[in-house]
Image (spheres, rainbow, N blue to C red):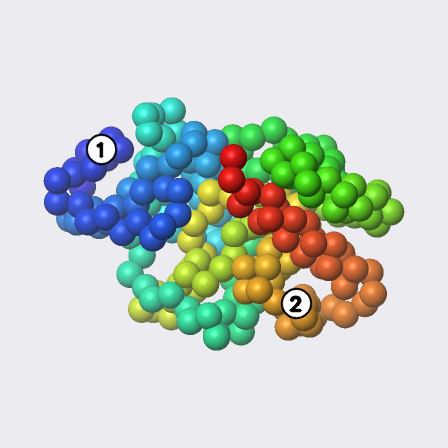
Amino acid sequence: MPIIDGRVPPTAHEITTGQANRVWLVDAPTPYVLKHYGTAARATNEAATLRLLAAHGSPAPRLLRAGTGGDPPWTAQRFVTAESVPAGRLLAELAIPLNTVHRIPGDHAGRVAGALHYPTWPAYLHSRLEAYETAAPHLASEARSLRNEINNTALDVQPRLLHHDLQPGHLIRQHTGQLVLVDWELAAFGDPLSDLARLAVRLRLDDLSSIADLVHVHDAATEHRLRLYWRIHRLADAALSQPR
């Protein structure tokens, strides 16, 4: 394999799909995907998460090299020959790979790397609400309401690995049949129900029953936590999509 140094070879094909990063497929003897990130924190987080997933034998691309201090920061990942799981099949196919990911424990809450670690999951949620309120002051009332609800909800959970950007296109099926989750730059440690709530927001679901089926638990406390996280992720989208 040629030296991977983060530079885009002349023969690379750009496959960027509209996100903040730029992505290329490099046709080396062993093809790989080169990603350039808008921030070093995202590159650092994805690189650390891919290493963690590899250590646990979980379904994710293999990290080849990373230059998180580069300009721009970058990662190179083994190219996975696969097709995206159709949106209509996403919930049915997601349970097994996601359950594997959610078994991986963390020793803190928040992003895997590249950002501040929090001692508890509620502390991380409070920090996110502060960020959303700062970005969109007109949403302060909803942020305060959610802050009070966090304080009055039992959220003493053992942090587990979350993909935290589940959506169509991020679950792919290899030609071998194995399902693989891609795009880990927003990965965090926290409550697995937050992963499902974020997916519900991405799928624009108001009825969370189909999402709740993924965890096979329908008690009132679980449903309350799922609805709480759903509201937080909706606030995040509303706040962070505001013009600066």
Q: Residue farthest to the right?
A: 152
Q: Earlier in the sequence, mark 2 or mark 1?
A: 1
Query: Could you tell me residue 4's position as x and y percent?
Result: 23, 35
Mark 1 lies on a secondary structure that is loop
Front residue of this view, candidates 43 and 149:
149
Query: Could you tell me residue 26's position as x and y percent?
Result: 20, 46
The amino acid marked with disc number 1 is Arg
Q: Which residue is mark 1?
A: 7
Quadrant occupied by the N terminus: top left
Q: Quadrant of residue 101?
A: bottom right
* Residue 183 visible from this viewpoint: yes
Front residue of this view, candidates 193 and 64:
193
Using residue 208 as the reference point, say whether residue 84 is left or right of it.
Answer: left
Q: CA distance from mark 2 to mark 1?
A: 43 Å
Q: Residues within 10 Å of mark 2 (few under 14, many from 20)?
A: few
Q: Which residue is mark 2?
A: 206
Q: Residues within 10 Å of mark 1 (few under 14, many from 20)?
A: few
Mark 2 lies on a secondary structure that is loop
Query: Could you tell me residue 146's position as x and y percent?
Result: 77, 46
Q: Quadrant of residue 172?
A: bottom left
Q: Is residue 131 above or below residue 233?
A: above
The amino acid marked with disc number 2 is Asp
Q: Residue farthest to the left?
A: 10
Query: Could you tell me residue 85's position as x and y percent?
Result: 41, 69
Q: Are marks 2 and 1 in contact (CB under 8 Å)?
A: no
